[in-house]
């Protein structure tokens, strides 16, 4: 643990800064789950500024990662962003194609994920696996595979619209990773026969589920830990499907071409995101898993150890066009 912490902060604190009388301010575009009052962003900002007083962060919140990426592409080279927090692995190609992001110098030695991470531009800061959540006291025989979930019409399913939700896109990726293109429209139509609702976002759909509607709701395998730790409620569980699951890896990156002082602060902040103290805050507030091997919180660390042994489908190299085609196919299937 000490070795990992030392590596992270050696990267951050050894960066050169100009001898300015006032701290350098950088703009951090951040999606809601990081920047909201209930998210980790505010406390991470305070901790970072204490550790690196020559830098100040200005958090600029966005209601979704899609909105954030669209804003960045619209602003282009004129964007005021210096760092972006909250992209995910299924936006990688679209983000790369924007040409806005630059490689960072943060060491990846501390990164510990179920898949090997080698990208030097987009830095993971948490991750989770998509799963359907159910109440164990109400659903005694949960599905053991995605195929069973699709075929069992006795189950009422809730999930998110992939056009507006990254978690909804996760289900689209999951289905298309397991089934050939000629079968997927039929699968969506079959699932639609016992889908209770397709909501705009996670908060809306999870809220419907918690009111007692539906048998399963799409979320992350970490969601039961929220209920256990925050509500002292052990009734909720996550499905474990035999085919394997799809990971959502949340990413941060710096904007290329910034002046030296801003670039140095951006580098320091990226390095800080994978420090043990920041990871502990991110894990507990985002209800996701840490990306480093250092201890953060016992329940999350135990789930991560299990996740490292669980089959994860390789979905890193998806193009924006491929995702667009898959979502259009989903939309066609539901409109018939």
Image (cartoon, rainbow, N blue to C red):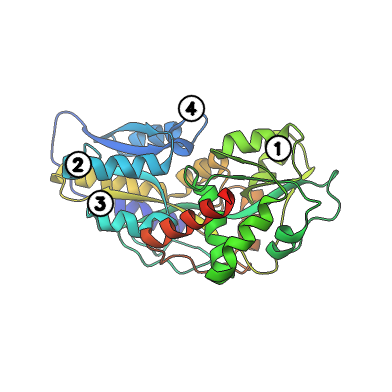
* Alpha carbons under labels 1 and 2: distance apart: 44 Å
Which residue carries the number 4 mark? 37
Q: Which residue is mark 2?
A: 262
Check disc 1: other Cα within 10 Å, few if <14, some if 14-19, many if 20+: many
Residue at the spot x=33%, y=32% of the render? 60
The percent coordinates of residue 275 (x first, y second) are 43, 49
Q: Mark 3 = which residue?
A: 14
The residue mark sitting in front, 1 or 2, is 1
Q: Compute the Cα span from label 1 to label 4.
A: 23 Å
Provide the residue designation for mark 1: 209
Cα–Cα span, label 3 and label 1: 48 Å
Find residue 261 and report its image quarter.
Answer: top left
Position in image of residue 245 (x %, y %): 61, 63
Q: Which residue shows up at 50% across the image and 43% down it? A: 282
319 is higher (above) or lower (below) than 233: below
Dot 4: within a 10 Å radius of its alpha carbon, few (fewer than 14), some, or many (20 or more) residues?
few
Sequence-wise first label, 3 or 4: 3
Looking at marks 1 and 4 on the same chain, the residue that comes earlier in the sequence is marked by: 4
């Amino acid at each position: 643990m000490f070795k990992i912490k030392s590596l992270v902060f050696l990267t951050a604190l050894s960066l050169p800064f100009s001898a300015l009388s006032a701290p350098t301010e950088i703009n951090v575009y951040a999606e809601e789950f990081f920047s909201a009052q209930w998210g980790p962003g505010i406390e991470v900002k305070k901790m970072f500024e204490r550790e690196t007083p020559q830098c100040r962060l200005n958090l600029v919140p966005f209601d979704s990662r899609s909105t954030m990426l669209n804003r960045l592409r619209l602003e282009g080279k004129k964007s005021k962003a210096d760092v972006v927090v909250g992209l995910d692995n299924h936006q990688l190609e679209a983000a790369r194609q924007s040409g806005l992001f630059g490689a960072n110098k943060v060491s990846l030695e501390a990164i510990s994920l179920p898949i090997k991470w080698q990208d030097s531009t987009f830095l993971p800061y948490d991750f989770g696996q998509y799963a359907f959540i159910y109440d164990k006291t109400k659903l005694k025989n949960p599905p053991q595979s995605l195929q069973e979930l699709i075929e069992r019409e006795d189950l009422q399913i809730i999930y998110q619209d992939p056009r507006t939700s990254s978690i909804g896109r996760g289900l689209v990726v999951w289905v298309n990773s397991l089934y050939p293109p000629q079968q997927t429209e039929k699968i969506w139509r079959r699932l639609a026969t016992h889908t209770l609702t397709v909501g705009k976002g996670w908060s809306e759909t999870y809220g419907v589920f918690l009111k007692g509607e539906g048998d399963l709701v799409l979320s992350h395998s970490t969601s039961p830990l929220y209920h256990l730790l925050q509500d002292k409620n052990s009734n909720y569980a996550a499905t474990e499907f035999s085919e394997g699951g799809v990971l959502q890896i949340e990413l941060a990156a710096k904007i290329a071409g910034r002046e030296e002082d801003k670039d140095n602060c951006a580098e320091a902040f990226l390095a800080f995101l994978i420090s043990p103290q920041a990871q502990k805050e991110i894990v507990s507030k985002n209800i996701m898993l840490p990306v480093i091997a250092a201890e953060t919180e016992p329940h999350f660390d135990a789930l991560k150890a299990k996740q490292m042994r669980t089959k994860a489908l390789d979905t890193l190299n998806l193009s924006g066009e491929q995702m667009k085609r898959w979502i259009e196919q989903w939309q066609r299937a539901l409109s018939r």
